[in-house]
Amino acid sequence: MKRAVRERQRPIVAAAAFLAFLALAPPSRAAERVTLRNGFAMRCDRHALVEGRMRLYLGPGGDNYVEFAPGEIAVFEQIPDPSPAAAAPQAAQPSPKLTPADLRQMLTQAGAAHNLDVDLLASVVKAESNGNPRAVSRTGARGLMQLMPATAAGEGVRDSFAPEQNVRGGSAYLDALLARYRDNLALALAAYNAGPGAVDRYHGIPPYRETRAYVARVIHEFNRRVRARAAQRSEPQEPLAAR
């Protein structure tokens, strides 16, 4: 059975209005650089060995983290906390070679490969990077769909700044999250933003203002695109010229 986010024609409205009123959480500051044995590196606030898994905390609290097997990690390096200017997301100018038509084609291909609605993918890209293939977040997420190095590696993405690779990997990851959460779009989006561990721990959308606002933002944009698509399809056709 095809998922609702694949071919739905009606907007999703659940929880979006409520979540849109929540403000973004303040950014976390990284204090360690973690290099994986596959060569990818990422930043985290700190790490700890918990029940045989190496837990990398992405913020000063204890609820936002990712986990790896200890053998997957090559080295930890202490790095100074960034200054407020350095902590701001670093983003190069969008590549002039990536036109809106190019991006739409990539999203269409990725959507077809994973049976995902192209407007859903476009909404995620807008929320994550606003279409900038060189975007880098303060936590090290990269590219159009803001893939963390570990996520990119898991999806076979070698260069997160290559738009086609990034879209392919991000779409595959979102598809996997939808399957994990039984096509619950809000939960899948929350996991895309905060990690599946946080969603599982709270048995729902985590109580992070940033994550809740993110889910609302994506759903709102998806609703807007679906409504626009439906309106365009319902426009009266130009009458044929009389012969």
Image (cartoon, rainbow, N blue to C red):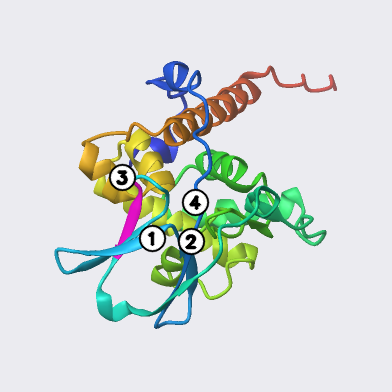
Q: Amino acid at mark 3?
A: Asp
Disc 1 crowd, CA 10 A, few/some/many (<14, 14-19, 20+): some
Which image quarter: residue 13? top left
Nearer the viewer's eye, disc 4 or disc 1? Answer: 1
9 to 144, vertically: above or below: above
Q: Position of residue 60 (x, y in %)?
A: 40, 48
Q: Quadrant of the C terminus?
A: top right
> Residues at badges 3 and 2 in contact (C-beta under 8 Å)?
no
Q: Amino acid at mark 1?
A: Arg
What's the mark number on residue 46?
A: 1
Mark 3–mark 2 distance (CA, rounded to whole Å): 17 Å
Q: Position of residue 124 (x, y in %)?
A: 53, 43
Mark 3–mark 4 distance (CA, rounded to whole Å): 31 Å
Nearer the viewer's eye, disc 2 or disc 4? Answer: 2
Relative to the observer, which residue lies in front, 230 or 135?
Answer: 135
**Is residue 185 inside the magenta stretch?**
no
Q: Amino acid at mark 2?
A: Ala
Q: Amino acid at mark 4?
A: Gly
Mark 4–mark 1 distance (CA, rounded to whole Å): 36 Å
Q: Which residue is mark 3?
A: 63
Q: Is residue 158 left or right of residue 92?
A: left
- The structure residue drawn at horizontal position 65% and vertical position 53%, both measured from the top left corner, is 83
Which stretch did the figure color magenta?
62-67
Q: Which residue is mark 2?
A: 31
Q: Earlier in the sequence, mark 2 or mark 4?
A: 2
